Amino acid sequence: MDGCGKTTQAEKLKAALKADGRDPLHLREPGSTGLGEGLRAMLLDTKREDWDPRSEALLFFAARNQLLRELVAPALAASRDVVCERFTPSTLAYQGQTPELRQWVLDLHRLVVAEQRPDCVFILDLDAEESFARVGGDTGHDSFESRGVSFQQKVREGYLAYAEAFPKTSKVISVAQRGIDEIAAEILAATKEYRS
């Protein structure tokens, strides 16, 4: 969800893993590669016209494919942990807002991600109204944040649908009315649990 504290929690997890003697790689999606950053600028531009969700999804998966090949695969080969802000759950939530589109996104996921699936996915859950308010309401910072509360409600439903589709590797964490450190402790504990 927009405004849920993804970056803060990713940085906290990275710091905790470093303190544990690990060498985590922190990435953002789309981004972290030349192609990803270029597509990010295009996708988040508030002045761009509306695109078909399939076109948006293809761009997100192009960025994801590059990220997986250029950065994730070498990091995993070197036994590094990878902490990534956003991944397929976001594409499902934002571009998969009908059953047909949801299936289309999941098919792309299987094709592009293949065996490089995440060990665990944390979905930081927040109700749509609070998410919308946290990013500035109608004056949101990017082309997705400014689409309104009803859009954010569909986004939330999409994240929860991802967790339902991948229950073994997904953990939904409510972030409303909770402190940053409390949420970080839950994420770290769950990370250790997934690894054992």
Image: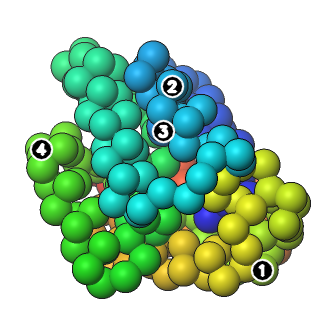
Instruction: Kindly report which numbered mark, 3 or 2, lies closer to the viewer in this rendering.
Output: 2
Q: Position of residue 146 (x, y in %)?
A: 74, 62
Q: CA distance from mark 1 to mark 2?
A: 30 Å
Identified at 41% across, 22% down, the residue is: 35
- Camera-nearest residue between 16 and 56: 56
Disc 4 marks a residue whose amino acid type is: Glu
Is residue 177 left or right of 182 when viewed as pictured?
Answer: right
Which residue in the protein does label 4 denote?
115
Which residue in the protein does label 2 denote?
38
First in sequence: mark 4 vs mark 3: 3
Q: Which mark is residue 190?
A: none
Is residue 179 left or right of 188 when viewed as pictured?
Answer: right
Disc 3 marks a residue whose amino acid type is: Glu
Which residue in the protein does label 1 denote?
129
Instruction: Kindly report which numbered mark, 2 or 4, lies closer to the viewer in this rendering.
Output: 2
Q: Position of residue 186 (x, y in %)?
A: 58, 60
Disc 1 marks a residue whose amino acid type is: Glu
Residue 24 shows in this picture: no
| Residue count near mark 1 (Cα–Cα under 10 Å), binned few <14, some 14–19, many ≥20 | some
Which residue in the protein does label 3 denote?
29
Disc 2 marks a residue whose amino acid type is: Gly
Q: CA distance from mark 1 to mark 3?
A: 24 Å
Identified at 73% across, 74% down, the residue is: 148
Q: CA distance from mark 2 to mark 4?
A: 26 Å
Is there CB contact under 8 Å for labels 1 and 3?
Answer: no
First in sequence: mark 1 vs mark 2: 2
